[in-house]
Image (cartoon, rainbow, N blue to C red):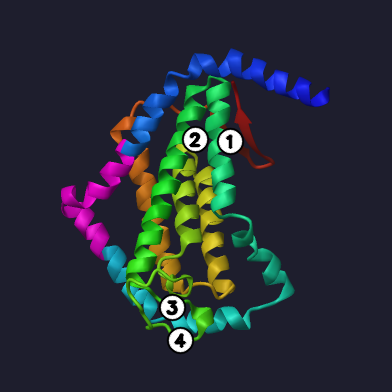
Amino acid sequence: MQKQIIVLFFLVFFTNNSFSQVEKFPQDFKNFFTVGGDIATAPLHFDSKDWILFSSTIAVTASAMAADNDIRSFALRSRSSLNDNLFNLDKYFYIPTAAVSVFGIYGYGLFAKNDNIRKLGLRLGEATFYASVLDVLLKGIIGRRRPEENFGDVTFKPFKFDIDKSSLPSGHTILAFSFASVMAHEVDNIYWQIGWYSFASLVGMSRVYHDKHWSSDVISAAAIGYFIGDFVNHHYTNSDNQDTNLSLTFSFNQLGLRYSF
């Protein structure tokens, strides 16, 4: 009997709330793939500023490779129970957590008839999905060995698409920074933004601490995740987004996050 009541509740909820929003989904679905197509063809439309950013990312990544072994040695020497707890975030934030967050936010916005929250969920979905797709492609094309394999920091096996040869870039970090860049864009408050980028940075550092990635893998991934999130935030299909009803209040004795319907 309880199961029937639960099913009936969801049927009533769905009927009353989501049918009136059903016309929103096809356009969101279309926009999702429009953004993906534009990300794929974006290099064809790079201007001088874009090429400078692209070249700078490659240059910084290449420069960071010179310090990969030293940073890895430092991370391995820093193992302790305290640091184990501090750098444990990568075990909890990855594709399943991001997916639940995206669907939860989008679904809430849809059912609650809140367009701003629904659009936030859509942007998060666009950024994290396409960042993850790019991550998989780059991993397979580059084929860099992971540090825990002990083959050295300059061992590459391109076009192998093997988990052991998928160090560059860091998938956890790309996902975290693409998610964080969308969330940071939502509230024009420095503390809110620092919080999200600190969270993403901690995910990246956790991957180095656990010997899953070189530091240069994390640096390149952070840049890629940020740029994809920024692209999604400013894409024309999302240009009509208004601020969500999130606000951050701060005083010397109080820090608060408020949401109003």
Residue identifier under label 1: 104
Give the magenta-colored segment's residue range.
34-55
Q: Which mark is residue 151?
A: 4
From the image, give the main secondary structure of the stretch colored magenta. helix
- For badge 1, the amino acid type reads Gly
Circle nearer the N terminus (4, 3): 3
Q: Is residue 61 above or below residue 123?
A: below
Residue identifier under label 2: 121
Task: Indicate the position of residue 29 as horizontal and vertical percent values.
Answer: 39, 31
Viewer-closest of 132 and 179: 132
Q: Are marks 4 and 1 in contact (CB under 8 Å)?
A: no
Which residue appears at 32% of the width and 31% of the height?
A: 237
Circle nearer the N terminus (1, 2): 1
Task: Indicate the position of residue 10 as horizontal and vertical percent values.
Answer: 67, 22
10 Å neighbourhood of mark 2: few (<14), some, or many (≥20)? many
Q: Are marks 4 and 3 in contact (CB under 8 Å)?
A: yes
Residue identifier under label 3: 145
Which residue appears at 58% of the width and 28% of the height?
A: 108
Q: CA distance from mark 3 to mark 2?
A: 34 Å
Q: Is residue 184 above or below residue 166?
A: above
Q: CA distance from mark 4 to mark 3?
A: 7 Å
Viewer-closest of 154 and 216: 154
Circle nearer the N terminus (3, 1): 1
